[in-house]
Amino acid sequence: MAESKSSLFFLFLFGFLTVCRGRFPPLMDGKNMEKDDNQPFVGVNIGSDVSNLMSPSDLVSFLHFQKITHIRLYDANPDILKALNGSKIRVIISVPNNQLLAIGSSNATAAAWIARNVVAYYPQTLISGISVGDEVLTTIPSVSPLLLPAIESLYSGLVSANLQTQITISTPHAASIILDPFPPSQAFFNQSLVQFMLPLLRFLSRTGSPLMMNLYPYYVFMQNKGVVPLDNALFKPLIPSKEMVDPNTLLHYTNVLDAMIDSAYFSMKNLNITDVVVLVTESGWPSKGDSKEPYATIDNADTFNSNLIKHILDRSGSPFHPEITSSVYIYELFNEDLRSPPVSEANWGLFYGNSTPVYLLHVSGSGTFLANDTTNQTYCIAMDEFDTKTLQTALDWACGPGKANCTEIQPGEACYQPNNVKNHASYAFDSYYQKEGKSAGSCDFKGVAMITTTDPSHGSCIFPGSKKVGNKAKETGKNTTQIPEASGGRAAAAAAQKGLHVFLLALCSFFLFIPLMAPW
């Protein structure tokens, strides 16, 4: 009888654990901690042409704050790799083009590179891949014969360290290696490059590494204005009549990026390579440009990157391969303000070098990744480098046609001092920005304003977007602009959720042990 009771108990226990594991995923600090590294992701590229770039330790803290889990570096910066130790952030490191000659000519040099930049950090720093060179076939074609030898030598170094199954190795290509990209079914690799591409693709197939592609719908649109609709480049919803249709496959393309990805798949298929996946190592949209780049705007950059994130995290794949969603690295995390003209070259970033957002991504509903539009702790202020006349013009518009509430910057009011145009403009800009719901483009004022996460309130002057507005409203009884949700409310909600979780587990446990008390 005891044996029967024991058997029933363990059968009941197995069922309980199975059900409760499905009902109650593991909790840590009030959050579900489920993870699947094989799922498609959105990462970011981090360039170094940034003035006053934050320290590596601050950078890692910032990445955690923004819930960024995948990054790509254009080198193997040892300080950043050290700072990533234990962070669980996955990083692709790179071999710069100027090192290809030495690595491609010497197995010993390649082995030393792996030892110095990979073995010295892995696995404490999660190096997930190595990108060898950047757009080598199209930018420095004279080095093309050494590209695959360099990759193979580095791969041998990974094999020697027994890391070949943990770390992939490939090389990023420009979209221009593919000719006739639309319709995708007719795309093919530039014939002059097939002598390099075919052996490379066979290597990628053999080692399970991806085809790295830098794909920019922005440039496709700019080079084909009047043919490619802007909405198609920006992932905006299209009516069926405006979707691109491949006449050979009858596949419908609702956005340019999917068409570019499928053109790569069809190009590989034409060479009988069908088991290599596409990894988009760069894609993005500039937020500012010169007179020849009228579509490089904050609104378009916000729309493109926000919709790109949603598209990838929706895991809908491409029309040709709906079962495969390519992961994408956004170009880029920070504006590289030290880059040479054109203007757009310095304005691809999601953030300025001081970590304030260039614009607020609208990614609600796509998890917590870069969800900086879901926090109300942002403000709009005047930038430092503009003259008084320019700021005064923007201030007059904000308080006039813009209908910002400028009462507080009148003589005798709380925000009149310090009595200067920059201070008054900052208050007016923030009033307008908050009134417009922090929508894309509402903190621009012809380029003289910027978004900041630092509360600009000072003394008794409380800015419209400040958390302090709530306390001021209670004191004065006045109506105010939108009041952000207090962090305490979210903490209380998380605590309540965790408490409920614990209670339900206890309840399950109580019913679990009822069979032990029953007579058998």
Image (cartoon, rainbow, N blue to C red):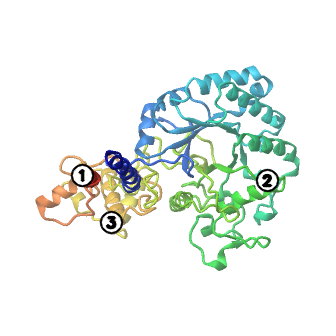
Q: 10 Å neighbourhood of mark 1: few (<14), some, or many (≥20)?
A: few
Q: CA distance from mark 3 to mark 2?
A: 51 Å
- Do the numbered discs 3 and 2 sit on residues whose CB atoms are within 8 Å? no
Mark whose residue sits in front, 1 or 3: 1
**In the picture shown, does residue 171 fall above or below 520?**
above
Residue 493 image-quadrant placement: bottom left
Which residue is at the front of the view, 123 or 173?
Answer: 123
Decide which of tag 2 and tag 1 comes sooner along the chain: 2
Disc 1 target residue = 499
User: Badge 2: how crowded within 10 Å, few (<14), some, or many (20+)?
Assistant: many
Label 2, on which residue?
268
- Distance from the alpha carbon under mark 2 to that under mark 1: 53 Å
Q: Position of residue 346 (x, y in %)?
A: 57, 46
SS at circle 3: helix
Q: Mark 1: which amino acid?
A: Gly
Residue underneath mark 3: 435
